[in-house]
Image (cartoon, grey):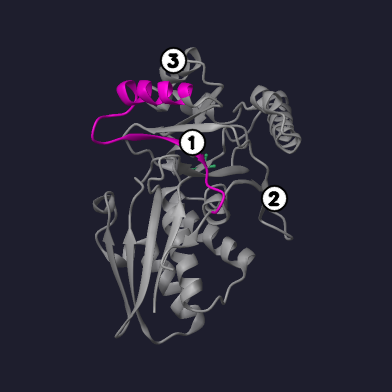
Amino acid sequence: MSITVYAPASMGNVGVGYDLLGAALAPIDGSLFGDRVSITSSTSGIALSVEGLWADKLPPAPEDNIVYQCALFFMQQLNKQQGIALTLEKNLPVGSGLGSSASSVVAALYALNEYFNHPYDEQALLILMGEFEGKISGSVHYDNVAPSYLGGMQLMLNTQLKVCDSIPSFEAWYWVVAYPGISLSTAKMRELLPAQYSQSVTIDFGRNLSAFVHASYQQDAELAMCVLKDVLAEPYRASAIPGYESAREALDKLGMLSTGISGSGPTLFSITDSLATAQAAQAWLETNYVEQGLGFSHICKLDALGARRIDK
Ligand code: HSE
């Protein structure tokens, strides 16, 4: 038996929902934008090979790779003796703000769960995904694993009943994402944020996020745009991302409706409902924000499907 699973790139926070909102991405040109994990049987133990554009940025020892660690956990928990061979196709850059580690973890755990006939249900698997991703990013937050696994726009609930649930998104929106080519550690980007916020910032955060969710259900794009503001992270992270502030200004002048930091950066996202404006923004970003040969940009819609088997 051979299984291959694809898990899409994702934007944590989506600007307005620090740690609480996340969305999965699908480039409109149909290009692959996420990691893939394949599993086949082998004679004994766990074998891992890593390939793909960003493979050489991962730790060289298989035991240090999060995909190997996911497999080891599964085998030990289920007391499995047979051998398995895994291949990770690393298609997302690490430390990019595109949920790179989440994509690997989601693809690995989804594939393992399929391979061993679904010992974990959706919620249990999601919790595992959060815990494994947290080993890399330094803390457990579900805003990348949830959308990469379940697709669309996910709102974190973090309750005993449910980790997250999907909320409606705006079909007309294009999400232009641009990765400049440098790597930033999520843990370090989290350290930039204050431990406490003032009462007025707290109220702004609650108001913006709840109004955004309300607007999403009402399909009121104007209201959603009006409140899509990041008062918690962007003020402290923007200056740590080279070129971000001037890009944001330029994208605003080009007519983009809102621009923010994807996850903890350095990838930025910028929204419009016009394909022509999205293309103009992408052209600007390719010339001014993206380092040739190291970075990239995509015009995306949201990936409604999330992680899925692509072997059948
Ligand atoms: N919510 C996380 C953060 C996402 O902003 O630190 C990291 O991709």
The part of the chain drawn in magenta is 276-305
> Label 2 sits on what residue type?
Leu
Residue highlighted by disc 3: 250
* Residue 193 visible at all: no
Q: Local crowd at mark 2 within 10 Å, few (<14), some, or many (≥20)? A: some
Q: Local crowd at mark 3 within 10 Å, few (<14), some, or many (≥20)? A: some
Label 2: element kind: loop
Rendered view: 50 above or below 205: below
Label 2 vs 3, first from the N-terminus:
2
Quadrant of image for the C terminus: bottom left
Residue highlighted by disc 2: 157
Residue highlighted by disc 1: 262
Label 2 vs 1, first from the N-terminus:
2
Quadrant of image for the N terminus: bottom left
Label 1: element kind: loop
Residue at point 38% right, 86% down? Answer: 82
Distance in Å between CA atoms under marks 2 and 3: 35 Å
Residue at point 28% right, 61% down? Answer: 50
Left or right side of 52 for 117:
right
Q: Position of residue 89 (x, y in %)?
A: 32, 58
Q: Position of residue 16 (x, y in %)?
A: 62, 32
